[in-house]
Amino acid sequence: MRSLIAAELLKLRSTRSAWIPLAAALAAAVVAVIANTSTAGHGGNPPLSPAALPDLLRSSGGQLVDGAVLLAWIVLSAGEFRHRTSVTTFLGQPRRLCVVSAKLAAAALTGAAVGLLAEALSAATSAAVLSAHHVPLHWAQPGVPGAVITVPLLAALYGVLGASLGLLLRNTAAALGLALMWAFVVEGILPVLIHAPGVVRWLPQAAANAVLHGASATTLPAGVALAVLAGYAVVLATGGALVTTRREIGTATG
Amino acid sequence: MNTIAVEALTKRYGTITAVDDLTFRLAPGRITGFLGPNGAGKSTTIRVLLGLARPTCGRATINGRRYAELRDPLRQVGALLDPNVFHPGRSGWAALRIAARPGRIPRHRVEEVLSLTGLAGAAHRRVGGYSLGMRQRLALAAALLGDPQTLVLDEPASGLDPEGVAWLRGLLRGLADQGRTIFVSSHQLAELAQTADDVVIINQGRLIAAGPMAGLLERSQASSLEDLFLGATSPHTQGAHPAFTRPRSLS
């Protein structure tokens, strides 16, 4: 299994269309801290204070990192069928569930690593900016450890969601389109269409927000939201595994 | 021992029967040409043999096992199905490293097969910039990664220049002389006539003829492999000549 996971990670490293979004998300983690701190004390925003640290860590590594990891693993897993590299993959390891497991593990590892790196970058940037403004740094205050744990955890789950969606649909454009449509359209209009605004908190993005920012009156408790998000990942991963084990692997020559 | 055995193999796609009760066996140390018109079922047979497609009934085995049951398959079977199975954005080197990982094949073997296939100089270029012949060589390099005893090659000479074809001929002969089983599907009959020891001819998914090429040519009184092939696959002569009975084994 280790060699299969290593192969999946090598695919990531050697595919620009997969790692460029991750690099962009890491850069955005730094930019987000600078942007948030530069507006502090202006235009009605509260001035910088030690209490700003948890929010800086959460906002910099949140949805951008999740989205980038999702995108990268959709490109990698669906791209196997687009570029027919699936033939080489399944000749090397014909036990297809092993390949699926390795992809999911590699996706989770990537998400966790990128999430941790984003947190490290935003922590370093926050420390530099807050120190420059003579704001003391309180790393042990409530919210900081939570952000450091939840950002990589959510990114790992989004990696699994991306890899699973790619395996399920086997079409990069369709999988990317569905993910974007879901994020920008479905989660917004579904509650209105079905006349049940309370449904929105059970949807993936709302659940991720509840995990990252904590529960509010309109969201699920963080623990329940995490379980809901994990449930989506399990359902999609099961679907991706079933499709991969049952369907045939094609070539141009038929 | 028979390295490749196809036994009563049938593969249907809906109402279309791609492979119909196909049986043949190959012996080691021989190059076997796998012939048939377009749509005869050659690629489907190979895909079933390699575990990429599931048979409707019957079985196809390598060393007595289905491909999915092979321990360390890359070290037992090398397969070339299509030169376009590499990500165009990756280098040839990265593509082979990725292919080598599941079999824990070391880095120096990747360098060896790149040199063997004449791609060492282009190893770090992107596959998207390779010519068809270079992609074919890369696919062959991937098939040779595990130094396997059995090679299954679908149109391996496609896209190669005359020098490449001659090189491939020498390579396959050398590998067969080492006792390996070489199974080559091809439409290039003149080339195959110089390379193959045995032939398996199928048409409409069914076995038409199989055996040592010299014996088949003699029995059918064909002057060339092309004559033998055209005679075997013609609806008028098929089954009428004693050469085109249905042998079950080449061994």
Image (cartoon, helix red, strand yellow):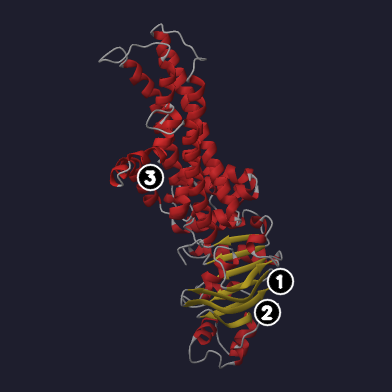
Q: Mark 3 points at which residue?
A: A179
Say left or right for A56 vs B209.
Answer: left
Asked if both marks, 3 and 1, belong to the same chain, the answer given is no
Q: How far apart are marks 2 and 1 (CA)?
A: 9 Å
Task: Identify the secondary structure beneath mark 1.
Answer: loop
Q: In this view, does A231 lie above or below A38?
A: below
Residue that sits furthest to the bottom in the current view: B240
Badge 2 sits on which subunit? B
What is the total number of numbered labels drawn onto the structure image? 3
Asked if both marks, 2 and 1, belong to the same chain, the answer given is yes
Task: Identify the secondary structure beneath mark 3.
Answer: helix
The residue carrying pointer 1 sits among few (fewer than 14), some (14 to 19) or many (20 or more) residues within 10 Å by Cα, namely some
The residue carrying pointer 3 sits among few (fewer than 14), some (14 to 19) or many (20 or more) residues within 10 Å by Cα, namely many
Q: In which quarter of the image is the C terminus of chain B?
A: bottom right
Q: Mark 1 points at which residue?
A: B2
Closest to the observer, A221 or B45 = A221
**Mark 3: which amino acid?**
Ala
Say if mark 2 contacts mark 1, CB within 8 Å: yes
Badge 1 sits on which subunit? B
Say if mark 3 contacts mark 1, CB within 8 Å: no
Q: Residue at x 43, y 11 (%)?
A: A50
**Mark 2: which amino acid?**
Ser
Q: Name the residue under label 2.
A: B249
In percent of width and height, residue A65 lies at 43, 33
Task: Identify the secondary structure beneath mark 2.
Answer: loop
Callout in the foreground (3, 1): 3
Asked which quadrant contains residue B239, the reply is bottom right
Residue that sits furthest to the top in the current view: A134
Residue that sits furthest to the right in the current view: B1
Say if mark 3 contacts mark 2, CB within 8 Å: no
Callout in the foreground (3, 2): 3
Q: In this view, does B148 lie above or below A22?
A: below
